[in-house]
Amino acid sequence: MVQTTPKRGDELIRLADLEWLDLSDLIRMDDDWRRTLVTISRMHLAINAVLSAIVVAYTLLGRLAPAALGEYVGMGGVVLCVAAMAYLAFKAGESEARLLRNLRFVVFLSILAVSLMVFLLRDLQGDYYLLYFLPLVSAAGYLGFTGGLFAGVVSAFAYAVVFFLSPVAIAPGSLSALVLRTLIFILVASLLGLIAERHLSLLSALRASHTQAIQFAITDTKTGLFNQDFLQSRLRGEMSRAERSKTPVSFLVVDVNGLDQINREHGYSTGDAVLKALGETIQKQLRVTDVPSRWGVDEFGVLLYNSDAKGAEIVAHRIAGEIARQTFADPTTKRPFQVTIAEGIASFPVHTQDKSGTELVDRAYQAMRRAKANHGIAVWS
């Protein structure tokens, strides 16, 4: 058996197996966020592609005068920007983190593509500056206030460059229109970014509080291990899985000898410290797939998946050896003392055919009571 220290993140992955915890809201929030991000990025790409096709077609076919060299360069730039956006969007796939990373480049390319399209349409009458709201909304919605503000400033600068290249730059009041439009870019993008940032902060806080509530519901506060309710709910599922996969499952009971006496002689805080230290020791000897718990007042229960009695006995000896090397001290007198344990083991399907797990636990307890006589380890027989 490979010794691996389990992590809390690995433990939370198994929460979906619990029938008594409703994780649907938490899972739905994550799924909705991921799906929305994917949808928006692809809609952004699709709208850019459609607009670029229309603008390129108009520049080539809808104008009376033939396209100039600068316009051919502009059309090529539009096509390259849309192609690069498509590459970044589809390369990210369904990965939320990669989409967020690529979104900054997608927004920049979108601003550049829109600027080139506005340049190609410069001889037409119309409010083509409104095309800039496409990258601004995407930037503000997923990059927050800072991202929206930056996108607004970049869009304002890009539009100013295109504006002065168009015939309307010399019209009366054109400078006032330019200033007003660039301010609208910055203000709208910043406001939308602030709203989106507040919304995402609220969603993140809700997700964190939900996760924390789940952790409190399944964790024993004194030891940091899982509590008995969690392990009991886990036990039935693991037994069914073991039967389907034809693999063994073992249950290990670790009893702390004389915990009441430790509490009386050294204080309850010392007893709690002993339990916490023993819980950490037990957890360090287990794999990520094993489930350690505080089972009773002075007992620990460990579910060992894909482990027969012989494998469980190896784990039990490792735990016993590690605890035998530990020394505790009275907080007042500083007098050292040691703690002894008794461990009992039962395995499925060798020792029981009951798939509910109740008989497995009972037989592990019977073995533990037999082991208490010599503070050792016993396997049910």
Image (cartoon, rainbow, N blue to C red):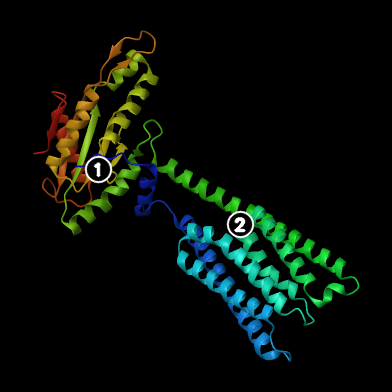
Is residue 76 visible in the rendered structure shown here?
yes
Where, quadrant-wise, is the N terminus in this rendering?
Answer: top left
- Name the N-terminal-most of marks 1 and 2: 2
Image-based side of 352 in relation to 131, left or right: left
Q: Name which residue type carries label 2.
A: Leu
Query: Is residue 83 left or right of 56 when viewed as pictured?
Result: left
Q: Is residue 366 depicted above or below 236 in this figure?
A: above
Residue for badge 1: 303
Badge 1 marks a residue whose secondary structure is: strand
**Residue 330, percent from left and from top:** 35, 13
Q: Which mark is residue 143?
A: 2
Q: Which image quadrant for residue 268?
A: top left
Task: Identify which residue is drawn at 36% across, 42% down.
Answer: 7
The quadrant of the picture occupied by the C terminus is top left
Image-based side of 169 in relation to 61, left or right: right
Identity of the residue drawn at 17% across and 51% down: 354
Label 2 CA crowd tier, 10 Å (few <14, some 14–19, many 20+): many
**Going by the picture, which residue comes out furthest to the top?**
333
**Percent of width and height locating residue 27:** 46, 57
- Residue 149 in which image quadrant: bottom right
Q: Secondary structure at mark 2?
A: helix
Kindly give the residue lying farthest to the front in the view shown.
69
Alpha carbons under labels 1 and 2: distance apart: 44 Å
Q: Amino acid at mark 1?
A: Leu
Asked if the residue at tag 2 contacts the one at tag 1, i.e. Cβ–Cβ closer than 8 Å, the answer is no
Nearer the camera: disc 1 or disc 2: 2
